[in-house]
Image: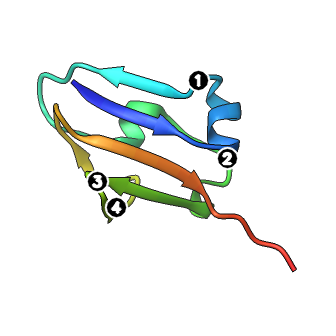
Amino acid sequence: MARIKLVGFFRYVLGKELIEIQLEKPKKLIDLIGELPDKERAIILVNGKNADFTTEINNNDEVIIIPIIGGG
C-alpha cells in the first residue's frame, strides 16, 4: 500500500491528511491524486528523496507533499 501524506495547503485543498492506496502496478503521483493548484510550489519526497508529480509510485512507497513557504 502506498501512503501519501499531505501537509499545509495541500491538506486543505484535498480535504485529507493521508491517502492510502493499494496499487496493482506503479502509477505516476499525479494520476493518484489528480491536479492540484500551485503544484509547482510543492516539495515532494518519495521515501525521503526528492521527486516530482511524474514520479512513479509503488506499493510500500511513502510520499510527502509539502508546500513551499515564502515570505519577505
Residue sitting farthest toward the left: 25
Q: Which of the two labelled residues, at mark 3 and mark 1, occupies the earlier sequence position? A: 1
Q: Secondary structure at mark 1?
A: loop
Q: Residues within 10 Å of mark 4 (few under 14, many from 20)?
A: some
Specify the quadrant of the image occupied by residue 28: top left
What residue did someone put label 2 on?
37
Q: Which of the two labelled residues, at mark 2 and mark 1, occupies the earlier sequence position? A: 1
- Mark pair 3, 2: CA separation: 18 Å
Q: Which of the two labelled residues, at mark 3 and mark 2, occupies the earlier sequence position? A: 2
Q: Which of the two labelled residues, at mark 4 and mark 2, occupies the earlier sequence position? A: 2
Q: Residues within 10 Å of mark 2 (few under 14, many from 20)?
A: few
Label 3 close to label 1 by CB (< 8 Å): no
- Which residue does the image show at 63% across and 34% down from the upper left? 11
Between 5 and 32, the one nearer to me in the picture: 5
Specify the quadrant of the image occupied by residue 58: top left
Residue sitting farthest toward the front: 48
- Where 47 falls versus 7 (above or below)? below
- Mark pair 3, 1: CA separation: 21 Å
**Residue 33 vs residue 9: left or right?**
left
Q: Secondary structure at mark 3?
A: loop
- Residue type at tag 3: Thr
- Residue type at tag 4: Ala
| Quadrant position of the C terminus in the picture | bottom right
What residue did someone put label 3 on?
55
